[in-house]
Image (spheres, rainbow, N blue to C red):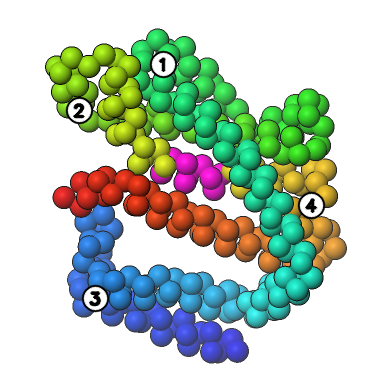
């Protein structure tokens, strides 16, 4: 099986090299060359990424360093995932974790985007909010965990709060940066037209910011899962973080890998979903980028 994985790895690598070599893209910058790949090649390369990952994983699972637990193969991990799915445990743990992220991240997004838009647009708000936000942003979010346990215990509110405080300050700062990066020509045109400050905020700043604000949320959504795991490792009886902790405690390595990879699966699905939503809602933004 390991020789098959090695053969697959070499074959797929050679195929990728051939595609890029024929189109003279081996050393091309991604930003300037994405349009040079046709749809068939894009799908092929996307699939090849996972094929290479699985082949490399299978190769590494055959290595048994002294004093280190053996890495389960992809097939062993799939079998463990099937067992957890049939028992209903994996779906239960994943749904609980997803609900916690949805609640905590949604509240943080609403508050952070609102504050960021206002602080990025109005001078007084900027001078009052940005210094404190920058100060709080440099405090490691996990440092808040002990304090949040004191105030909220170890119930669901505590887990929502960990996610909220984990991303709120980064969302706020990144949205401020988005607003400050808006093309000044749009603002100058609105001023010369006689728009008031609030009208500029509503009709220029907000519409121009939304596409990149959604990108900010995509980035911080991944961070919210990090803080969820930190929250679930303490006092949680359910959730993917709890599944990982229990699997590690009883050396159920296969289950541990399933829990970790479930995070990745949820992440790529939500990330692609948000990217699709952005392209549907803000088609004008992507057209202008292509031009």
For the point 52% across and 32% down, which residue is it? 110
Label 2: which secondary element: helix
Label 1 vs label 3: CA separation?
50 Å
- The residue pinned by badge 1 equals 126
Look at discs 1 and 2 and give the one toward the viewer. Answer: 2
Please tell me which of labels 3 and 2 falls first in the chain.
3
Q: How many marks?
A: 4
Mark 1 in CB contact with mark 3 (< 8 angstroms): no
The percent position of residue 14, horizontal first and vertical second, equals 35, 82
Look at discs 3 and 2 and give the one toward the viewer. Answer: 2
The percent position of residue 274, horizontal first and vertical second, equals 45, 51
- The residue pinned by badge 3 equals 21
Label 1 vs label 2: CA separation?
20 Å
Label 1: which secondary element: helix
- Residues in magenta? 215-223
Quadrant holding the N terminus: bottom right
- The residue pinned by badge 4 equals 238
């Amino acid at each position: 099986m390991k020789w098959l994985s090695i053969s697959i790895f070499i074959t797929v690598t050679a195929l990728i090299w051939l595609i890029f070599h024929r189109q003279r893209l081996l050393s091309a910058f991604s930003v300037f060359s994405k349009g040079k790949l046709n749809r068939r090649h894009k799908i092929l390369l996307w699939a090849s990424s996972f094929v290479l990952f699985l082949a490399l994983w299978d190769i590494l699972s055959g290595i048994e360093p002294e004093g280190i637990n053996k890495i389960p193969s992809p097939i062993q991990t799939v079998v463990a995932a099937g067992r957890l799915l049939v028992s209903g445990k994996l779906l239960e743990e994943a749904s609980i974790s997803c609900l916690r992220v949805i609640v905590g991240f949604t509240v943080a997004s609403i508050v952070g985007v609102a504050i960021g838009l206002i602080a990025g647009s109005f001078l007084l708000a900027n001078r009052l909010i940005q210094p404190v936000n920058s100060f709080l942003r440099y405090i490691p979010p996990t440092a808040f965990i002990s304090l949040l346990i004191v105030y909220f215990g170890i119930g669901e509110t505590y887990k929502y709060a960990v996610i909220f405080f984990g991303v709120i300050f980064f969302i706020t700062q990144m949205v401020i940066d988005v607003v400050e990066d808006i093309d000044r020509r749009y603002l100058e045109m609105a001023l010369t037209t006689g728009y008031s400050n609030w009208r500029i905020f509503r009709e220029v700043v907000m519409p121009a910011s939304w596409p990149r604000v959604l990108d900010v949320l995509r980035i911080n959504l991944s961070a919210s899962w990090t803080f969820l795991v930190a929250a679930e490792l303490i006092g949680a009886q359910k959730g993917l973080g709890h599944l990982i902790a229990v699997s590690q405690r009883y050396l159920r390595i296969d289950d541990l890998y399933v829990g970790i990879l479930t995070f990745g699966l949820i992440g790529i699905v939500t990330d692609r979903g948000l990217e699709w939503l952005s392209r549907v809602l803000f088609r004008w933004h992507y057209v202008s980028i292509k031009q």
